[in-house]
Image (cartoon, helix red, strand yellow):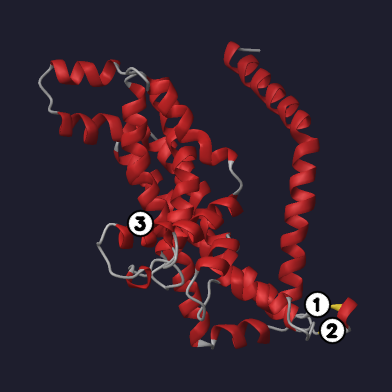
Amino acid sequence: MTTSHRYSKTRTTFGLWQLIQLAPALLVVVGLFGGALALALLQSLGFAPWFGINEFPNPNYFLALWSEPDFWRSLWLTLYYGLASTVVGLVISVPLALTFERRFRGSKTLLALTRLPLMIPYTVGIALALLMLGNGGILSRLAAGLGLITDPGEFPRVLHTHLGWGVIAVYVWKQVPFMTLALLAVLMGVGQGTREAARILGASQVQVFWRITLPQLMPGVVSASLICFAFNVGAFEAPFILGGGHPETLPVLAWRYFNDANYTYQLQGMAVIVSLILVSGSILVGYLAIIRRFERVRGKAP
């Protein structure tokens, strides 16, 4: 047996052993999440014998949903909240990560303060938004006290509008610490050697950022943005409490179907959930394909 064959056999054995070790966790993930996804798909196609409904396969729930203009408005609103907050979070987190990498006086204290939202429950952030950003909230009263406006009711409307400033603010407040820590971990792993060498050779700060720093950050950017976008499009509480009402995001729309007195509407709610999974999954796959192509162009992917 040649050395290459022996090495290949060793790698195969090692891979099988790793798969065996991961088998319990994989069974839980596949059983719970895969089973829930399969059940949702079956119900959205008319299979719910516990409700006395067995029409499988019946696409009418999807057809009725997709024929409604409000569904497409809700889909757009859902994607808008998810994408806008993810982009804003990245714009804030990249400079923060680069700043904390330099280790200045007091950086550890500031980094610890940046982590605080990770330890505060998500619903507390929503309550803070109501207290701070509402027309009768702290900021509006402060503006009135300073004479910037004559009455707190004149404060620009931030909450309960389809522009979603309050929803996006809560998302960004919660995800910036996570994104910053993810990007900082990548920066600490690659070090500053390449960037310092480029500066010594005469590259400007802008050239160093676009040609060296940003490509080095891409693994962290991709993973952090995928996780945050997936969370944002599936979140329910912030759009429900802080959103502008009808039309609502798809998670809120699904919740209303599930809580309707007519239990058969649960199947329509499952159609909403499956539709959201299909759309968001397609976006994530397309995003990964673009990143893969970018890395292939730069010679970093096979």
**Mark 1 vs mark 3, CA separation in Å:** 55 Å
Q: Amino acid at mark 1?
A: Phe
- Quarter of the picture holding the C terminus: top left
> Closer to the N terminus: mark 1 or mark 2?
1
Residue 47 is labelled as 1
Give the labeled residue for mark 3.
Answer: 142
User: What's the residue at 61%, 16% (across, down)?
Assistant: 7
Dot 1, crowdedness within 10 Å: few (<14), some or many (≥20)? many
**Mark 2 vs mark 3, CA separation in Å:** 57 Å
User: What's the residue at 71%, 27% (across, down)?
Assistant: 18
Q: Amino acid at mark 3?
A: Leu
- Quarter of the picture holding the N terminus: top right
x and y, in percent, of residue 56 in the image: 78, 80
Q: Quadrant of residue 157?
A: bottom left
Can you see residue 256? Answer: yes
The answer to the question of whether label 1 and label 3 lie on touching residues, with beta carbons closer than 8 A, is: no
Give the labeled residue for mark 2.
Answer: 53
Is the residue 84 above or below the residue 207 in the image? below
> Closer to the N terminus: mark 2 or mark 3?
2
Can you see residue 275? Answer: no
Dot 2, crowdedness within 10 Å: few (<14), some or many (≥20)? few
**58 horizontally vs 180: left or right:** right
The answer to the question of whether label 2 and label 3 lie on touching residues, with beta carbons closer than 8 A, is: no
x and y, in percent, of residue 122 in the image: 59, 51
Q: Amino acid at mark 2?
A: Ile
Secondary structure at badge 1 equals: strand
**Mark 1 vs mark 2, CA separation in Å:** 6 Å
Is the residue 283 above or below the residue 107 in the image? below
